[in-house]
Image (spheres, rainbow, N blue to C red):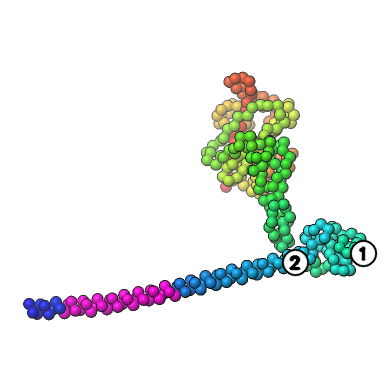
């Protein structure tokens, strides 16, 4: 028993020594981890400080740059039209006052001395190297002179005509939907307080129209996959041809990526071909196209053929015709 106890004691002592060794190693590793954590926190704090310093420096430089640009713009602003010229020549009088080429006259608008046609090369250099305002009402974007023209063509505040055939209002591109919903008297969206969302539709969406003696129907607005489309129907006089065309709220290049299918029919089922079905498949025209040219981009049907498409309702007081429509994106 004494020998066994001695052996047990030796084993326990060995275990204790080994445990202490492991404990020390764990403690050492724990301290190393703590040290690493502290160093990481210091590095992170240092990184945050540097980021904040960089941000502050950037803001200071940005304000300084804006202040310099504002002063340069103020110096070359034409005193007549109060605009910064976007092209030369810029004329100067003998006292150094500037005037743009559109407003130049025989005398200086600032000091009234005679203008001889002297040009300021420095002013032209300045206007070529500063940012210019878009100038379209509502847009506050500043751009280099070389990009201002391209921007104005696609500026979301550019004015376009309302897509409704009988509405002549000019509206900012970005406000067209709001106009159709709240202001346009020739819009079904305003009348119904609703825009038809076809995004979840898997096939054709069918609409019944009453036959009425009017020059043009109100515009119908549709939403499909985040894009807005407009259906216009008009007549060339009460006994003339009918035209049906689809427009899209987008530029011409974007519109070319989409397709609209329009079916004019009599039967309830759009797939039924009873000899009186008219179809159009093609890309919608841009809402920015001229109204007279847009009516030639869709489906044209004679008044005689429209008479065969009419369907008398159950109460026999109103003729109707059906239009089915769907959209898809060209692959």
Residue 241 in view = no
Q: Position of residue 138 (x, y in %)?
A: 69, 52
Identify the main secondary structure in magenta.
helix
Region rendered in magenta: 10-39
| Position of 71 relative to 231 (above/below) | below
Measure the C-alpha gap from mark 2 to mark 1: 26 Å
> Quadrant location of residue 215?
top right
- Which residue is depicted at the point 24% across and 76% down? 19
Where does label 1 land, which residue? 114
- Which residue is depicted at the point 20% across and 79% down? 14
- Which residue is depicted at the point 52% across and 38% down? 202
- Which residue is depicted at the point 56% across and 35% down? 204
| Position of 141 relative to 271 (above/below) | below
Q: Position of residue 329 (x, y in %)?
A: 58, 45
Tell me: 226 left or right of 124: left
> Quadrant location of residue 203?
top right
Q: Nearer the viewer, residue 224 or 81?
A: 81
| Position of 11 relative to 243 (above/below) | below
Where does label 2 land, which residue? 71
Tell me: 229 left or right of 1: right
Q: Position of residue 247 (x, y in %)?
A: 66, 41
The local secondary structure at tag 2 comes to: helix
């Amino acid at each position: 028993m004494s020998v066994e106890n001695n052996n047990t004691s030796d084993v326990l002592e060995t275990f204790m020594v080994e445990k202490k060794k492991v404990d020390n190693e764990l403690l050492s590793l724990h301290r190393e981890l703590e040290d690493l954590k502290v160093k990481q926190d210091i590095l992170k704090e240092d990184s945050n400080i540097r980021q904040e310093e960089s941000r502050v420096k950037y803001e200071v430089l940005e304000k300084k740059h804006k202040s310099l640009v504002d002063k340069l713009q103020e110096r070359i602003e034409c005193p007549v039209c109060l605009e910064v010229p976007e092209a030369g020549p810029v004329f100067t009088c003998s006292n150094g006052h500037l005037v743009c080429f559109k407003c130049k006259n025989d005398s200086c608008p600032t000091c009234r001395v005679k203008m001889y046609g002297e040009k300021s090369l420095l002013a032209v250099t300045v206007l070529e190297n500063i940012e210019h305002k878009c100038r379209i009402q509502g847009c506050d974007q500043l751009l280099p002179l070389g990009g201002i023209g391209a921007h104005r063509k696609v500026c979301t505040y550019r004015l376009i005509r309302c897509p409704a055939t009988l509405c002549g209002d000019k509206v900012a591109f970005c406000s067209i939907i709001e106009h159709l919903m709240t202001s346009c008297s020739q819009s079904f969206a305003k009348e119904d307080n609703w825009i038809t969302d076809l995004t979840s539709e898997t096939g054709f969406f069918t609409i019944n129209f009453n036959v009425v003696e009017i020059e043009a129907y109100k515009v119908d607005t549709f939403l499909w996959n985040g894009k807005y489309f407009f259906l216009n129907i008009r007549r060339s006089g009460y006994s003339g041809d009918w035209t049906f065309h689809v427009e899209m709220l987008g530029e011409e290049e974007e519109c070319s990526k989409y397709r609209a299918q329009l079916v004019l029919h009599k039967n309830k089922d759009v797939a039924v071909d009873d000899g009186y079905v008219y179809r159009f498949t093609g890309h919608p025209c841009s809402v920015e196209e001229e109204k007279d040219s847009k009516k030639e981009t869709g489906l044209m049907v004679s008044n005689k053929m429209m008479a065969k498409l009419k369907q008398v309702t159950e109460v026999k007081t109103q003729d109707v015709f059906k239009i089915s429509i769907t959209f898809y994106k060209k692959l």
